[in-house]
Amino acid sequence: MNAKKHLFRIMALSLVASVILISCKQNALSLWTDDAPAKKALVEYVESVTKKGSADYIPVEKRIAVFDMDGTLFCETDPNYFSFMLLQYRVLEDPDYRERATDFEKEIALKVKTQNETGASFPNLVEKDHLKVLMSSFNGFTPAEFNDYVQRFKELPMPSYNGMKRGEGFYRPMLQVVDYLNQNDFTVYIVSGTFRYIVRGIMHNSPLNIPINHVIGSDELLVSQNQNGEDGISFTFEQGDKVVFADDFIINNLKMNKVTVIMQEIGMQPVLSFGNSTGDSSMANFVVANNPHKALAFMLCCDDTVRENGNEKKAEEMKQLCASHPGWVPISMRDDWKTIYGDGVSKK
């Protein structure tokens, strides 16, 4: 009798577990529309590569997914990149720094401001100049001090949205993608063009479930505050020294540089890529080309102009780019997502 009760109990627990598993799978991407082609492609992919015995099965240690940050996981334009808005605030608005800003810093910050207000384009602003100003204006900060600064900036309201602060601009459907991949034993990395420590600051106390040591971004030079320009190979870090940002950057992590840092820091070819612009094309092609495992590259298309600061022209160009690249899957923010930023957030 006891054996029968035990058997029935095991069967009941197994049934409950199955129901819970089915429910979790059904709710995993609940913020996506039911007929979203990108959702269907992702679910079919994950199920095929995680099922033991499947021809597409990928061992857990090979399940690497890489995500761009701005425009892929987080609001890209309000009215500009988070890092550009941080630069403008630091140089032109911060009462503790604006009077000390150099002429070059003011020149670049004013270009950012003009770009925000008019849409004007300036040579070298993305590739070089904004990086120089970020480094010079935060020169001497420790990583902890810089993170505190970013946390304060995150509390400012978003200009284009009601009900959202600067640090809350995560795309809710993409957060579900990260969680879905984590649940299926993928290792997830961020590979961003934004400074690594800005990305870490955005992620701090956020709903994005990615470890901080899985953040790859553009890198600034770190030194001891007592190093005074001496080469690190000959300088000895002493007890009581502090690591601070120097007035220089090492790499702008865009385009081909994303491929380089993936191999340097991850050491293997990922099987999933998520991006949103041509700056992510190299990463996407690297993931899908000559991969021994089944691989896909998803590209977000910013085609929603009601709930997001979308750009239909750029979105259409990205959709056409996906159509011409095998293994690329477009994601329509307008058609594939039930929400972008969640309830209580609306575009002004």
Image: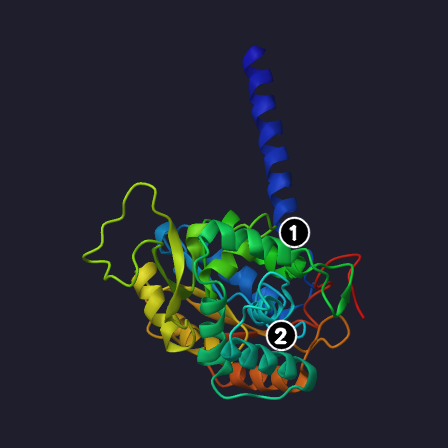
Disc 1: CA contacts within 10 A as few (<14), some (14-19) or many (>=20): few
Quarter of the image for the N terminus: give it: top right
Q: Residue at x 62, y 34 (%)?
A: 15
Tell me which colouring the rendered structure shows. Answer: rainbow
Q: Residue at x 40, y 55 (%)?
A: 244
Q: Residue at x 56, y 21 (%)?
A: 7
Vertical arrangement, residue 12 with respect to residue 288, above or below: above
Vertical arrangement, residue 51 with respect to residue 278, above or below: above
Label 2 sits on residue? 80
Residue 307, located in which quarter of the rendered image? bottom right
Quarter of the image for the C terminus: give it: bottom right
Amino acid, disc 1: Gln
User: Extreme left residue here?
Assistant: 234
Q: Toward the viewer: 75 or 251?
A: 251
Could you give the CA–CA distance between mark 2 and mark 1, rounded to whole angstroms? Answer: 35 Å
Q: Residue at x 80, y 57 (%)?
A: 344
Label 1 sits on residue? 26
